[in-house]
Image (cartoon, helix red, strand yellow):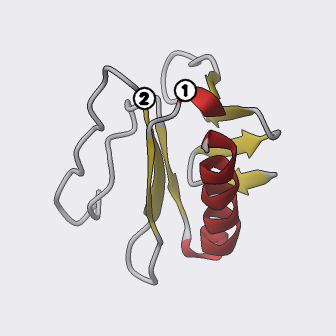
Amino acid sequence: MDVKGVLGTISFDGEWVTIAKTPVGAKPAPVRIRAADITGTRFKPGSRLFHGYVQFVLPGSTAAGEKSGLSHGGRPPYEDPHSLSIPRRSNDAAEKLVAAVEQARG
């Protein structure tokens, strides 16, 4: 199950979530998170004006807050390794991915 984001993709194979971001500057390594280790998920659907996001919360870490302003539109910063911005056309796929991760967590 894959979701195409604004600057990357999120993949879920039933056990592992992989967030691969398109590099801005130095090439970041993909982040792999085991579904059982995720303590929460945050999903904000994209609209016609602003991109949404998918964010995963891990134990011992706080979720990156949403940045304000027209260019960010209430999304976590790009540097947050556990989130990815998504366009409106990816809302359905992102919602299904979040539901699958929530089911695998339980």
| Farthest-out residue, left | 68
Q: Is residue 21 left or right of residue 50?
A: right
Lower sequence index among marks 2 and 1: 1
Is label 1 in a helix, a strand or a loop? helix
Q: Residue furthest front?
A: 106
Q: Quadrant of residue 99?
A: bottom right
What number is the disc on residue 19? Answer: none
**Location of residue 23 with respect to 103 vertically, above or below:** above
Tag 2–tag 1 contact (CB < 8 Å): yes
Q: What kind of element bears circle 2?
A: loop
From the viewer's side, name the closer residue of 97 and 7. Answer: 97
**Residue 19 x/y as whole percent:** 62, 34
When asked about the image quadrant of residue 59, the answer is: top left
Residue located 66% across and 52% down the image = 103
Distance between the alpha carbons at the discs numbered 2 and 1: 6 Å
Residue at image position (47%, 71%) is 45
Tag 1: residue type? Asp
Mark 1 Cα-neighbour bin, 10 Å: few <14, some 14–19, many ≥20:
few
Report x, y in % for residue 4: 69, 55
x, y (%) of residue 64?
28, 38
Residue 95 is drawn in which quadrant?
bottom right
> Which label belongs to residue 58?
2
Q: Residue 43 placed where, x, y %?
A: 46, 60
Q: On residue 37, which mark appears?
A: 1
Q: Residues within 10 Å of mark 2 (few under 14, many from 20)?
A: some
Q: Is residue 1 left or right of residue 82?
A: right
- 28 above or below 19? above
The residue at the point 77 percent across, 51 percent down is 2
